[in-house]
Amino acid sequence: MSKSVLELTPVQTVACCSPLTQEPLTLEAAERIAPLVKAIADPVRLRLLSLVASHEGGEACVCDLNDAFDLSQPTISHHLKVLHDVGLLDREKRGVWVYYRLNAAALVDVGSLLGGVTR
Amino acid sequence: MSKSVLELTPVQTVACCSPLTQEPLTLEAAERIAPLVKAIADPVRLRLLSLVASHEGGEACVCDLNDAFDLSQPTISHHLKVLHDVGLLDREKRGVWVYYRLNAAALVDVGSLLGGVTR
DNA sequence: CGTCTATATTGACAGATATCGATGCGTTGT
DNA sequence: ACAACGCATCGATATCTGTCAATATAGACG
């Protein structure tokens, strides 16, 4: 676990909020949600998310992901960490390899918040 | 108009894309979408969006918005410009006042992209 | 014309972020 | 035990971003 159990990832704090268009976001709500949106607000991380999500079995090994970019391995590792820290990607180590898997509910929550679709 | 008619705002380029979870985003698609998400990835701008959207008549004067924040007027103006430049907020000057209005379709598009909801 | 008022722009600065090379740390295989 | 491999972390650096004070612009109103 990358965080204390007493500390919620941004993802765990979004589902509770009304869509943006319904009522003004409080300062606190906005500050809880922004880091999650910020995590997706990068072309590399958008592609990482979609690569993982659409990969066979719903998961992808870091080795697969590295090859898809013209970036160094530490850079990809950094972006994966950002996505993992906010709860959008789950991480599992199997042998030498590390597999990432999309937390789909999390992405849906953000989408609902923005689009105003209640479910 | 803040941009050439030949140049699309990020908002105008999102609707065409599959949800993230369906197929890998191309490099080009990711680079077109990221600026739009980046525009919402800030607590102040999230609150601005929700304030404008939920305001009476669906629009809000800058003077109203300034008062809702403990930030300088130029800072709010800057954030409004960011949201306007990507096409999320429409801008209309009436007399001395400037009114901003949400481009709701734009927000829905982003939400759909993330949540995977086709409509 | 001059002044007030609402908003935008500019310039400066501190803090955040993306990137890389070097290195560390487990795990596998010899 | 050791070498090779996959991935994470560290430290450095360049660029980006949020913020403010100062200033510009543009409309309204005398």
Image: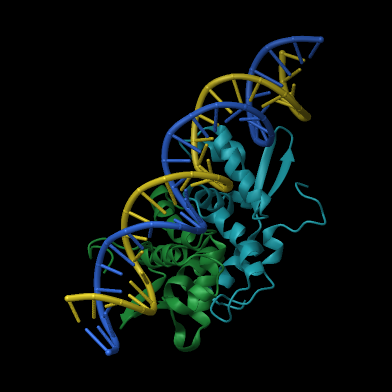
Chain colours: A cyan, B green, C yellow, D blue
Number of on-image labels:
0
Q: Can residue B35 be seen in this view?
A: yes
Q: Is residue A92 left or right of residue A60?
A: right
Q: Which of A100 and A112 is in front in this view?
A: A112
Q: From the top left corner, tell me how far across and down residue A75 is, in percent.
A: 55, 37
> On the rendered structure, is B55 left or right of A97?
left
**Vertical position of residue B99 compared to residue D2: above or below:** below
Q: Seen in the image, is B92 located left or right of residue A105?
A: left
Q: Where is residue C3 in the image (x, y as percent from the top left)?
A: 30, 77
B77 vs B63: above or below: above
Residue occupying image coordinates x 78% and y 56%: A7
Image point (55%, 59%), residue name: B21
Camera-side residue: A107 or B51?
A: B51
**Placement of the C terminus of chain A among the 4 image quadrants:** bottom right
Residue D23 is situated, as x and y percent measured from the top left of the image, at 32, 59
Q: Name the residue located 45 percent from the left edge and 55 percent from the top edge.
A: B34
Residue drawn at x 57%, y 64% as measured from the top left: B43
Residue B47 drawn at (x, y percent): 55, 71
| Residue B116 visible | no
Q: Answer with the quarter of the image where residue B89 lies.
A: bottom left
Give B38 or A98, whichever is nearer the viewer: B38
